[in-house]
Amino acid sequence: MTGGFFQNWNGFVGIVLALSGVEAIANATSVMKLNPESTEDHPIVTKTSTPAITSVMIEVCVFTALLGLGMMALNGLQIHSGDVDAPGSPGVRDYMLRYMANVFVGNAFGLGVGQIAGWVVSIVFGGLLLSAVNTAIVDLIAISFLMSRDRELPANFEKLNSFGVPNLGLLIATAIPVILVVAVKDMAGLADLYAVGVVGAIATNLGATSTDKKLHLGRWERSLMFCTFLIMASIEVSLFIDKPNARVFAAVVLAVGLILRGLVVERAQKKAMPTAETTAEAKAAAVAPTFAITESDVSGAPILCAVRGIGRTMDFAIEEAKAWHRALYLLFIREQPVMAPGDRRRKWTDDEEARAIFAYARERAKGLMILPCYAVSDAPADTIVDFAATIGASHLIVGAPQRSMIVNLLRGNIIRNISDLLPEEINLLVFA
């Protein structure tokens, strides 16, 4: 180490920022596979999370060190005004990896091969940057959705499109990175904005977790987390002091978020004031619709129909249940990629589309036992199969998939997924 304390501290901050990407995999523990002995009420994911976090941490540390050593092996680098110049290549700071490929491969195999290697590196890391952008957009969507579910943002942020993604959250999460890239031309300026955000997020997470007495953590775990929180908080303070643009950016984000939250709280307080009309509506919504039930005509195992909406699949299921004299379970699943606490306990009476579907079935199925089922799920195929096995259905009726080829490629064919999971004694009927 050279220089005084603050110069070395800035070097330490740079190292922490270089390794902070490991936080991305740590934040993914909430969607990892549970240990066999754990439950959703007491989730434990150590068998998945430990190898994942360890391998990513080793990769980040090793490759950062190797690339740093490789950069130090280059001859003629000069640092001035925050940029780096190389012989014949001024300003290589923002494309250092391509320059390293040009030099090392070119020296070994010739200038032409070195240029090809440089372009290959550029393409590969361009793809990695697009992946990072996608991660940022997905995280922004998830955060805005969960905050809306917690009544911290307007309810429009939780309205989903046909793909199960919030439209408003997607629009804003895409627009923010685009505006930042257009507004901040310098790579170092963008890095400063990232640094304040990621260090602040890690510090907040560690501080909130280590001081939450409701969490079952060991004393050494709390101590380690809290000490790390103090270090990250110190780094955040130093970033606020050294990087004024990042300070302004963080202040604007906080101000906008607090203003939106204030509007939501104010609106919720107004809606909470009871009136005679709203009380009557609440009582009406609490009463489940009366479905026509004639148990004397029902025989045999029930039929389960998974419906997406009012259409020919549900009509077909109703007619088949009448012909076979079977009870019919109608299952409507609200597909939701991001699950918030309490989502699985939501009722169909709170879902406008589900109410319309079950009301239509009640009118059409005169003299038939129909039982409405409702679920909020991030894995529709698993939920459908679970319902079918639980009620002991003889037949499962589903509509033909309406996803495009590219969506099936990304998310899988739900019919194939159901078929792979469904017990052999349950017949699968696909209505097309």
Image (spheres, helix red, strand yellow):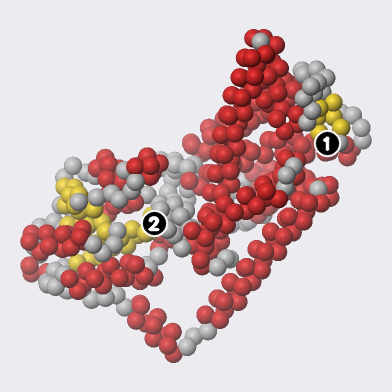
Q: Quadrant of residue 187?
A: top right
Question: Closer to the camera, 132 or 119?
Answer: 119
- Which label number is shown at residue 335? none
Asked if the residue under mark 1 is in contact with the one under mark 2, i.e. CB atoms within 8 Å, the reply is no
Amino acid type at circle 1 is: Gly
How far separated are the C-alphas under marks 2 and 1?
A: 47 Å
Residue under the point 64% across and 19% down: 115
Residue 297 image offset from top left, x and y in percent: 7, 67
Residue at image mark 2: 162
> Does 171 appear above or below 363?
above
For disc 2, the neighbor class at 10 Å (few under 14, some 14 to 19, many from 20) is few
Residue projecting furthest to the bottom: 276
Image side of residue 362 versus residue 257, left or right: left
Residue under the point 62% across and 46% down: 218
* Of pointers 2 and 1, the one earlier in the residue sequence: 1
Q: Quadrant of residue 154?
A: bottom right
Question: Closer to the camera, 183 or 4?
Answer: 183
> Does 115 appear above or below 27?
above
Residue projecting furthest to the right: 4
The secondary structure type at the circle numbered 2 is loop
Residue at image mark 1: 82
Image side of residue 393 versus residue 55, left or right: left
Give the position of the N terminus as an image quadrant. Answer: top right
Amino acid type at circle 2 is: Ser
The secondary structure type at the circle numbered 1 is loop
> Does 17 appear above or below 240?
above
Residue 323 image offset from top left, x and y in percent: 7, 61
